[in-house]
């Protein structure tokens, strides 16, 4: 007899201030073969409020994956990454940097802050959609993550 298992959705936090890029990421994730819940915030302060369940985010889940832009209003993505990776309750969440910056100093700094990977946003629409699909596929289908939610 085969046991039925409830399929738990993957909770993804997208930290992106560009409405166009956020919409494209949402579109790519909706086409995904994985069942996911996408939560989007538009600046670094909202990201930390979400992660620490402050204010309107008091009932949100801890994300399984964070997709983080670097150049954000209010609180920079580098600051958000540093806070995540220094916090015992958050540091094991994979953080994918998805940004327009191709600057070597940004790449080095984010890896020094323990980003799990760094991806420069493709300018081509189809390539952007493909990259987002591959991020989710890799981190949620291939990689084994700890179950410490």
Image (cartoon, grey):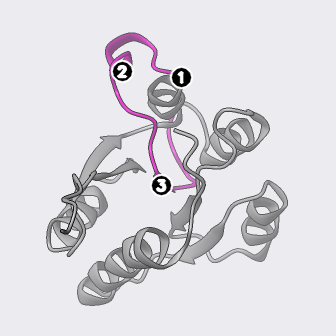
Work out how far the residue at label 2 is from the one at label 3, CA to CA, in angstroms.
Answer: 17 Å
Quick check: marks 3 and 1 in contact, CB under 8 Å?
A: no
Sequence-wise, which precedes: disc 2 or disc 3? 2
Provide the secondary structure element on which disc 3 rests. Answer: strand
Relative to 75, say whether 142 is above or below: below
Give the magenta-colored segment's residue range.
Answer: 52-73
The residue at which mark 1 appears reads as 52
The residue furthest front is: 1
* Res 32 visible: yes
* Rendered residue at 30%/43% (across/down): 39
Magenta stretch holds residue 10: no
Q: Answer left or right for 25 relative to 104.
A: left
Work out how far the residue at label 3 is from the one at label 1, CA to CA, in angstroms.
Answer: 15 Å
Quick check: marks 2 and 1 in contact, CB under 8 Å?
A: yes
Q: Position of residue 91 (x, y in %)?
A: 69, 44
Say the numbered circle drawn on residue 57.
Answer: 2
Q: Main secondary structure of the magenta part?
A: loop
Q: Answer left or right for 45 relative to 1.
A: right
- The quarter holding residue 27 reads bottom left
The residue at which mark 3 appears reads as 65
Q: Answer left or right for 35 relative to 77.
A: left
Q: Quadrant of the N terminus?
A: bottom left
């Amino acid at each position: 007899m085969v046991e039925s298992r409830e399929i738990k959705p993957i909770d993804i936090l997208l930290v992106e201030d560009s409405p166009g890029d956020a919409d494209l990421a949402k579109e790519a994730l909706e086409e995904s073969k994985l069942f996911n819940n996408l939560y989007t915030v538009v600046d670094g302060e909202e990201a930390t409020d979400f992660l620490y369940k402050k204010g309107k985010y008091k009932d949100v889940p801890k994300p399984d994956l964070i997709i983080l832009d670097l150049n954000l209003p209010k609180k920079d993505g580098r600051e958000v990454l540093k806070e995540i990776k220094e916090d015992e309750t958050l540091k094991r969440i994979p953080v994918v940097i998805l940004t327009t910056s191709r600057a070597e100093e940004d790449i080095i700094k984010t890896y020094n802050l323990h980003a799990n990977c760094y991806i420069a946003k493709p300018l081509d629409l189809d390539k952007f959609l493909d990259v987002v699909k591959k991020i989710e596929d890799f981190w949620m289908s291939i990689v084994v993550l700890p179950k410490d939610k």
